[in-house]
Amino acid sequence: MTKYKKSALKMNFKFRNINIKQPKFWLLLLCLGVLNSCYSFTGSSLTDEKTIQINEFPNNAALVNPTLSQQFSTDIQNRFLQRTTLKGTKENPDILVEGEITDYSITPTTIGSNTVTNQNTGGIVNESQNKLTITVKVHYENKIHPDSSFDRSYSDEAVFNSNLSQSEIESSQVKIATDRIINKIFNDIVANW
């Protein structure tokens, strides 16, 4: 038998200065195995719940975005149905999520938070910014685990240059704020952090 084959049979492999015959290697491998078995990456606190009903969120804010109610309701339904094993239902759900949009406002922020050099004059131009704020009141009812149920308000905002048109605000900035709100709601219900 050649010298190469003998060394291969002894399994004296080194990978980046790690010798598998050393106790440190086996201790590291054992620790990784124990850590992997102790932690589950599913992250869901929903174990017994099978069905969910998400009602439409009416827009009861003083300033009404005509598409916000339908878009928010569709987005939150999609989030739960696509990222959990819950099935949508209209009759006797294990989980009920409903609520309303209570605030939709656009307010100016401080002038001069962003500065741009004007290429024509070489001077500095202060751009004013606006802030979009959306607040949603949520009622979450868990019939399997009633102690998990809650009523909360969620709010988020998006800051943007004041030169955006109303349609640009509604197509981009509203999506940013509502996605963040939906993430918060989803995490509070599913991850229960």
Image: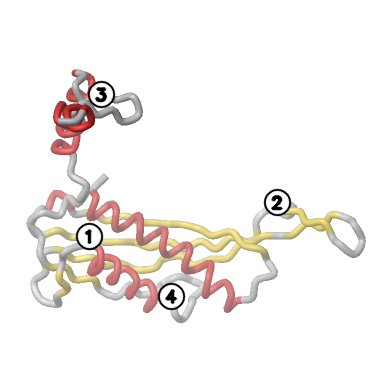
Task: Estimate the spatial distance between the alpha carbons at disc 4 and disc 2, rounded to whole Å.
Answer: 28 Å
Q: Is residue 20 above or below residue 65?
A: above
Numbered tag placed on residue 50 in the rendering: none
Q: Is residue 36 above or below residue 17?
A: below
Residue identified by numbered label 1: 140
x%, y% of residue 131? 59, 60
The answer to which of marks 1 and 4 sits earlier in the sequence is 4
Residue identified by numbered label 4: 68
The answer to which of marks 2 and 1 sits earlier in the sequence is 2
Q: Quadrant of residue 55?
A: bottom left
Residue identified by numbered label 3: 19
The answer to which of marks 3 and 1 sits earlier in the sequence is 3
Question: Which amino acid lies under the numbered mark 1 shown in the image of this protein?
Answer: Tyr
Bin the neighbour count of mark 3 within 10 Å (Cα to Cα): few under 14, some 14-19, many 20 and up: some
Q: Horizontally, is 88 left or right of 69 in the view?
A: left
Q: Please tell me which residue is depicted at 29% across the width and 75% down the height of the picture.
A: 56
Residue positioned most to the front: 1
x%, y% of residue 91? 10, 76
Q: Horizontally, is 140 left or right of 142 in the view?
A: right
